[in-house]
Amino acid sequence: MNEIYEELIENLLEKGFGSVDNWFTHVEIQNLREELLNRYQNDDFKVAGIGNQLEFQLAKSIRNDEILWLYRDRTVEVEKCFFQKLDGCKDYLNRTCFAGINETEFHYAVYNPGSFYKRHVDRFQNDDRRRFSMVLYLTDNWQDGDGGELMIYKPDTEVKIQPKAGTVVFFDSALEHEVLVSRTERLSLTGWMKTL
Ligand code: OGA
Ligand code: MN
């Protein structure tokens, strides 16, 4: 496990982002996808926002994915396994880089065909505790042309990441990024590592 964390973290610190595709097993990905879809069919998801009610229309022109927050005291087995691995990575980050991460938050996300999330940063104007953003993609059988790629914008370059099931990407929450229009049902587990 440590080699995976090392690869991820080395890239994260060096370039501001890093990705791996061998952290979670096929079975774990499949179980997480099934859990997400169960909860989605149960109508547990809400259209994601960016602020209060007045801002709702504005929000829909910026993002139109649907999300469901995860709570650690209400998890099923495969989510416990996810949190265990994630915490392993967080502890490793704190031990080796003194990252000072003491809080995490995660939600499932569904981007139906036509959905997107325009260019933005993950830090709020009045709350800059989000240090690293993480996405674990769960889309079954993503293909070229399906859209929904993650763009990460750096001052000198831009990077396009394919949202293939099993890929995990970490990036500095201060970096601008965007989810391009998806043409399939794009599924993910997204979260943040936060400092005090
Ligand atoms: C977000 C976000 C990226 C992705 O939810 O803030 O930028 O690839 N997600 O899903
Ligand atoms: Mn974001």
Image (cartoon, helix red, strand yellow):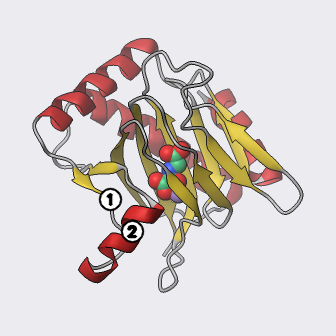
In the rendered image, which quarter is residue 18 located in?
top right
Picture coordinates of residue 30 (x, y %)? 35, 17
Q: Quadrant of the N terminus?
A: top right
Taking 160 as reference, is 3 above or below it? above
| Front tag of 2 and 1 | 2
Q: Which residue is mark 2?
A: 59
**Nearer the N terminus, badge 2 or badge 1?**
1
In the rendered image, which quarter is residue 133 located in?
bottom right
Classify mark 1 as within 8 Å of ligand 1 or not, answering yes or no. Answer: yes
Taking 81 as reference, is 56 above or below it? below
Residue drawn at (60%, 38%), measured in percent from left and top?
149
Q: Tags 2 and 1 in contact by the CB under 8 Å rule?
A: yes
- Residue 48 badge: 1
Q: In the rendered structure, which amino acid carries the disc numbered 2?
A: Ala
Q: Is residue 2 left or right of residue 58?
A: right
Mark 2: which secondary structure? helix
Residue drawn at (81%, 51%), measured in percent from left and top?
15
Q: In the rendered structure, which amino acid carries the disc numbered 1?
A: Ala
Quick one: label 1, few (<14), some, or many (20+) residues within 10 Å? some
In the rendered image, which quarter is residue 175 located in?
bottom right
Picture coordinates of residue 20 (x, y %)? 64, 30
Compute the Cα span from label 2 to label 1. 8 Å
Mark 1: which secondary structure? loop
Picture coordinates of residue 42 (x, y %)? 10, 36
Q: Is residue 97 left or right of residue 163?
A: right
